[in-house]
Image: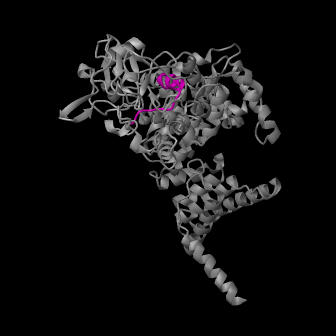
Amino acid sequence: MKKIILILTIISAFKLNAQKLETVHSFVRERHEVSWYETQQKLWKVEVDKNNFNGEAWYNYYRATRALAHVFNDEKIDSLQNDAIREKYSKLSSQIAEDAYKAIPNSFEGNLLMSLNNNLELQNIKYLKKAYDINPLDARTYDDLMLHNQYIQNQQEFEKFAIKMFEYNEIPSSILNWGYNILSELDENAILLTAGDNDTYACWIVQSAKQFRKDVQVINSYMIMEDDFRNKLFLNMGIAQLNLICKNAKPEDVQTNQNKIMQHLIDSKKSIYTSNSVIQSYEAKWGENLYLNGLSYKYSSTPIDNTSIIRRNYEKRYLLDHIKQTFAFNIGDKISDEFNSMYLPSMLKLYKSYQESEELFKMKELEEYILLISEKSGQQSEVFEVLKDVKFTPTLLTTLLDVKEIEKNMISISDKISMNKYEVTNGDYSKFLDNLKRSNQIDLYKTVMYDSNVWVNQFSSVMLQNPMVNLYHWHPAYDNYPLINVSYESAMTYCEWLTKQYNLQRNREFTQVIFRLPTEQEWLKAAGSGNEKAITCFPNDQPYIKNKDNDTCYLANYQPITGRYFDDGAFLTGTVYSYKPNASGFFCMFGNVSEMINKKGITKGGSWYNKFDECNFQKQITNTKPDCGVGFRIVMEIIEK
């Protein structure tokens, strides 16, 4: 039995040593799972036991234990047991701070832990000040010193430590951006109610370090519950005192007191805002009078056109580049993702407004932010659900197009009308389908999907059916082959999609265009290189040229007179750049695939399985269903240069 116990002890010690000691940061800067804090608590306890004078070990041991008092929650046990465990860790963290101070009373860490343990009570602020005096370059005292000076309303010292917080990168730059943006949207001399450390600190630091919107009074909703602080603050603000005793209030009285303070601020006749981070504390009583402005809600007794305000903020006041990319690391960067998620309510409202007013380019820009934020904050499903409810497409316009390639392939046939030199390919259409699939437009995706089984109707031989059915529409080898087996409606939908996509691209040549199917006249003009009465695009209307006696080289892909499809150089369809173009530069106007025009059921030019006379430009071929010999090419009509 002793051997077993010894072995288990060795294994336990081995497992513990296999874990790596890591710095335990403040819970407001970095958060981990309960198991991580439990492991770090044990590891740092070992370090404390090794060396009772190790300040960093004491600090991290305390931080891990205190974090457990906040985050511990075991779903397998009831709430009373969870509360008891959290209370245990809370008492243990207090004991750790006292033990550390006894061990190293003249150290930075010993005094810092005593100040943290006493929550900045004035009689114990001496520990915080002593820690700062011992090492004024250690930034771990700055936030509490800033907070303390806000409590006692010492503005000069408050700004001093707010600026130090900025200089030592204590708050992630993206959260400071959040602070800048929320301040930018407020009325002059407004009051902004915030919730916790990061949202309050971000505003204070931006005001102090950047001297931005210092007219705004930023009030932490929990600090203002402190009677002494509230009285001093109201005195400095010129607001009447509020006879309210919040100290040691019962939990059930906290909300009542918050409402009384809110009403008192409203009665002061100042502009009152609550940040998104604290709205849940006020919406039950004041929800009908709180209007979303972007990152805040403004109280108003009369209705507000908040859509126009949100538009103004995003278009003229906010700085948003930090959402896409940051170039400075901070341990609190993960917390930034939570802050960025507070943009989503107003972004979704603005997105819908852009959609209703058909401001497609603005939709595209805003959509990038919505998708990026929702992905990083883990709210994709919630975002898609909201977009589904309001019946507009979440990723309607997300594809990056090579507009220069599209424009290069267009050949002018009149002043504002150009036609693509190539037929639409499988590769072109796959981008369309992929966009629909990624945007969760599954019903539309199914509607416009090609029907590969059409090949079965064309061939009786399974040896011919299978490779076409299984490979033609998706294998990369067929990317440059013409798209076939789609309906007229699918072709029209593709044109609409391409129109929206093009008009949102930044580097496009034209301001606005429409992509569509050609009219019969436009098609004839392109096919005949300007001669709308031409019947083919060949010299002397001959389908082949002679290289030498009794030898021919076909100029197009159609059914040869021999009846053998491969005699013309292509067994079935050929690539869209096969054979020589006509005099205007258009490929495969004769044969390959019969091309749809804007009249439903009518195609022109014949296909790989049509005979020579059936491909005559002047003839119309009737096709009412998806067909393995029918495709289309697009026209670009310039609406605005």
> How far across and down, in percent of the image, does residue 619 sit?
41, 16
Instruction: Give the number of marks.
Output: 0
Depth check: 134 or 140 in front? 140
Residue name at image x 56 percent, y 73 percent: 17
Q: Let me know if residue 138 appears in the view.
A: yes
Q: Is residue 176 above or below residue 512?
A: below
Q: Is residue 106 above or below residue 145?
A: below
Quadrant of the image containing the C terminus: top left
Residue 509 belongs to magenta span:
no
Q: Is residue 519 left or right of residue 75?
A: left
Quadrant of the image containing the N terminus: bottom right
Depth check: 537 or 2 in front? 537
> How far across and down, in percent of the image, does residue 301 sit?
71, 15
Residue 552 picture quarter: top left
Depth check: 172 or 193 in front? 172
> How far across and down, in percent of the image, does residue 494 sit?
49, 26
Q: Let me know if residue 504 appears in the view.
A: no
> How far across and down, in percent of the image, does residue 348 sit?
59, 27
Residue 263 picture quarter: top right
Q: Is residue 28 above or below residue 508?
A: below
Q: Is residue 598 above or below residue 86?
A: above
Residue 509 picture quarter: top left
Residue 485 belongs to magenta span:
yes
The residues colored magenta run: 481-496
Residue name at image x 28 percent, y 16 percent: 529
Residue name at image x 60 percent, y 39 percent: 380
How is the rendered protein coloured? one colour
